[in-house]
Amino acid sequence: MKKKILVGIQIFLASTIIATGVTFANNSQAGSSEDPLVAKSYVDDKINQVLEVINGTVGSDKDVVESGNISTQQVSGNIFKPVLVEVGQTIYGKEGTELILRSGKGNAVVPGAEGISNLTSGLELRNKGTVNKNHLIIIPRSDGRGVKVTEKAWFLVKGEYEIK
């Protein structure tokens, strides 16, 4: 009786092992159409193509117009451009321009009753209000809003702006 149970267990284990092996054998093999092998040169070529597209897009999205001491520039896409503004100058943003004061000091320039959106604090900057470092500022309209620099300042700018 013990022999019959032992033989039954051995047959069960053997069939389980064979079934498992067949299952794995039927799965895709490396190099098959389900799981192709790829050469390093192919991957490098695809990476270089992607980098060319990225570099081509980033490098071609700047327009600069200068006349006298007024500089109008535009940075489009999803990049911020570092911009140096000297003491006494004002950086004016066009509609939708994003500014981040990285160093130096400046005060908001707001010609009307409405202010400039400070998204970091969730508050509105009024005329002559202090612009805090590392706060994201958005210019809502192209009506002369910006930041007057009181200490040499570096800004990160995304969008169209003028320095006067």
Image: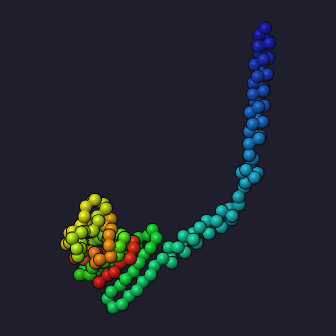
142 or 62: nearer the eye?
142
Color theme of the render: rainbow
Residue that appears at 69% across and 65% down: 41
Quadrant that contains the C terminus? bottom left
Residue that sits furthest to the top in the current view:
1
Relative to residue 21, is residue 77 depicted above or below?
Answer: below
141 or 34: nearer the eye?
141
Using the rendered view, name the quadrant where residue 56 is placed: bottom right
Q: Where is residue 61 in the image (x, y as percent from the top left)?
A: 48, 76
* Lateral position of residue 32 relative to residue 78, left or right: right
Using the rendered view, name the quadrant where residue 135 is placed: bottom left
**Does residue 143 appear in the picture of this structure?**
yes
Residue that appears at 77% across and 10% down: 2
Q: Where is residue 1 in the image (x, y as percent from the top left)?
A: 78, 8
Residue that appears at 26% across and 81% down: 89
* Lateral position of residue 57 relative to residue 4, left or right: left
Residue that appears at 29% across and 65% down: 117
Residue that sits furthest to the left in the current view:
128
Q: Where is residue 110 in the image (x, y as percent from the top left)?
A: 23, 74
Relative to residue 128, is residue 69 depicted above or below?
Answer: below
**Does residue 100 appear in the picture of this structure?**
no
Relative to residue 22, is residue 129 depicted above or below?
Answer: below
Q: Position of residue 98 (x, y in %)?
A: 36, 69
Residue that sits furthest to the bottom in the current view:
68
How many dots with numbers?
Answer: 0
Using the rendered view, name the quadrant where residue 142 is placed: bottom left
